[in-house]
Image (spheres, rainbow, N blue to C red):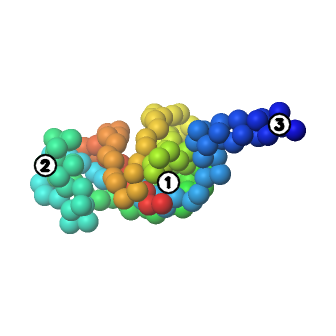
């Protein structure tokens, strides 16, 4: 009987130290931004990330192309159409200490051109530089609430 209790306690402690596999839903927001030096000025819809954009990237103009809200559930990819022939898969892969871990995969046709994982605090935004687009590049702003 004591041995069973010790095993149960050990398994319980092990489960507490591992990332949560019974993942809750996370609301994610993906904004697709076109950055270029052809135009100047910033889209008013990007005012909350204007300082981040200016400190990380060296472009004169930023324009919001798409704003998508996603409901993410554990290990089920949500697909965002970035541009014809390009898609982004966003997958909730874990939750750690009040942070959600997301896997980001950018595809061109069937080829993966970006495959990364990020950890986000609720309400925070991260920026990921993307591929060329027209006279500039695409930038992805990702945020989450949980």
Q: Which residue is mark 2?
A: 60
Residue at point 21% right, 49% down? 52
- Residue at 53% across / 33% down in the picture? 111
Separation of disc 3 and disc 1 at Cα?
53 Å
User: Which label belongs to residue 80?
Assistant: 1
- Earlier residue among tags 3 and 1: 3
Whether residue 99 appears in this view of the structure is yes
Quarter occupied by residue 16: top right
Residue to which mark 3 is pinned:
2
What is the residue that sits farthest to the front in this orientation? 2
In this rendering, position of residue 136 left or right of residue 13:
left
Q: Residue, x 39% and y 51% (percent of image)?
A: 121
Q: Name the residue rendered at 26%, 66% in the picture.
A: 45
Secondary element under disc 1, as helix, strand or loop, is strand
Marks 2 and 3 sit apart, C-alpha to C-alpha, by 69 Å
| Residue 136 point in image, percent of width and height | 24, 43
Tag 2, which secondary structure?
A: loop
Looking at the rendered image, the disc whose residue lies closer to the viewer, 2 or 3, is 3
């Amino acid at each position: 009987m004591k041995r069973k209790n010790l095993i149960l306690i050990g398994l319980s402690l092990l489960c507490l130290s591992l990332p949560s596999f019974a993942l809750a839903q996370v609301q994610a927001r993906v904004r697709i931004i076109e950055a270029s030096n052809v135009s100047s000025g910033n889209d008013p819809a990007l005012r909350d990330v204007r300082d981040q954009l200016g400190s990380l990237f060296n472009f004169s103009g930023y324009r919001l192309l798409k704003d998508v809200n996603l409901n993410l559930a554990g290990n089920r990819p949500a697909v965002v159409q970035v541009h014809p022939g390009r898609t982004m898969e966003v997958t909730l892969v874990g939750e750690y200490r009040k942070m959600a871990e997301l896997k980001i995969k950018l595809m061109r046709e069937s080829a993966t051109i970006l495959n990364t994982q990020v950890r986000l605090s609720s309400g925070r935004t991260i920026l990921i530089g993307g591929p060329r687009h027209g006279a500039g590049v695409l930038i992805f702003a990702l945020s989450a609430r949980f």
